[in-house]
Image (tube, helix red, strand yellow):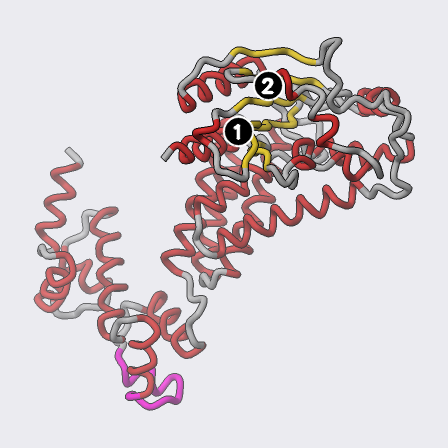
Amino acid sequence: MNEKNLELFQQTLRASSVNCRILYQDETAFSHMDCQLRMHLYENYSYLDNFKNFTHLLKSGTMIRFLDDFEMYYFFLHIPEEYLEDYQLPYFSVGPFLESRPDDSHIQKNMFRCRIPDTLFNDVAEFYASIPVLENIAMFENFTRNLASGLFGQEYHVLYLPDTESSIYKHANMTLRLRQNPQLAMYRIEERYETERQMMSAISNGDYNRAHEYHQKFTTYYIQPRTDNLLRNFQNFQIILNTLCRKAAELGGVHPLYIDDISTKFAIAINEARSQRELQHIAGDMIHKYCILVKNYALKGYSQAVKDVISYIDFHYAEDLGLAFFADMLNLTKNYLSSLFKKETGLTLTDYIHQVRVRQAITLINSTSLPISTIATACGYNDINYFIRIFKKIFGISPKQYQKTILHSGR
């Protein structure tokens, strides 16, 4: 049960788009503390040796706030043993993160201090572009400390480094050998595209939690602004996101008509947004709505014949539809089509048609004041009594009773 507290701690901090992890005894997680920056820059950098320089300070109830030579911040916390698995060390790493986005001159100054040649400027700049910015680090520090205290049952005090004792991630050591071709920019760009791919994959499967997690990570990557207008830049970023979501939903098997409808609504909302906060809300809503769209309308996994039937019903539900009609349309026998449809959807063709029609009826009842007889006709039922029987069979109440419930709840 205690291990759940550590998992919750990590998940909560990741919601702030910050890299964080528990360190393992096999040392596999150490290079991820700085997102593998030094691993790609140097041939002989030892994360473990440098981390050992201050592990004696990471005692029970201690949280270290550390600023490295690249002016990136980290938190390191000591985790009580009762919250750990056997293969885990009692050290938790949070970061790196920045206080502000460095400009070109600031990046060059940091490179000079760390003895990195100017030829690697694009690589280092690309790395900085992938690191999240937390404008109020003091608030994030208090949040992390209080969260750790609550989850791990002890008060944490903060130690601020570097000081004269500690030298983690220091580059004064002249024995560090720079790699001949670090390709740091290529690595970070590949990582960004992989994050984008994972986000799209999650959306195409209707997996909102995973899509949200990768979207949070995706937002940490800094994209060079196209204009000097801050709001316009945020709008451009959301337009890109809308395009990615649209493509993901298409990969998920959603019919283009549904995708076009939701995509158009979000495009209008993005264009009409008047603040960064409003655009951030639109982005979260976008991920959620596209995942719901995939869950409700995805045709992935169905045979082409069943896809054709479902798509036709969705857009022609008011017409006179039946097994004979679709068998003739697809040049298949009725028995074969009936068996295939039931096997793949779990419903008979007739039941599926009723579900689509009644779902549309619900939409009309919720959004209009049309008479029930008019709604029945609009949904493909010429016999009002038959419509009432089908509606009641699916929902347990009559259309009129449902309408009264809606009217009553709206008062």
Q: Where 363 falls versus 123 (above or below)?
A: below
* Residue at left offset 72%, top offset 44%: 189
Label 1 residue SS: loop
Q: Within the image, what quadrant is residue 25 found in?
A: top right
Q: Residue furthest top?
A: 164
Q: Is residue 276 left or right of residue 41?
A: left
Left or right, 143 with reference to 40 = left
Residue count near mark 2 (Cα–Cα under 10 Å), binned few <14, some 14–19, many ≥20 = some
Q: Secondary structure at mark 2?
A: loop
- Height in image: 311 above or below 410? below
Q: Is residue 333 located in the magenta-colored stretch of the structure?
A: yes
Q: From what the image shows, is residue 326 above or below residue 196?
A: below
Mark 2: amino acid:
Leu
Residue bounds of the magenta highlight: 322-335
| Residue at position x 83%, y 21% in the image | 105
Q: Is residue 263 magenta-colored?
A: no
Residue 108 visible in the current orientation: no
Q: Nearer the viewer, mark 1 or mark 2?
A: 2
Q: Which mark is residue 343?
A: none
Quadrant containing the C terminus in the rendered view: top left
Question: Image quadrant for the N terminus?
Answer: top left
Of the numbered discs in the image, which one, if any, rests on residue 58?
A: 2
Q: Quadrant of residue 399?
A: bottom left
Secondary structure that dominates the magenta span: helix
In the visual, does 51 lie left or right of 255? right
Q: Position of residue 120 (x, y in %)?
A: 87, 35
Disc 1 to disc 2, how far (Cα)? 24 Å
Residue to which mark 1 is pinned: 16
Residue type at mark 1?
A: Ser
Closest to the observer: 156 or 384?
Answer: 156
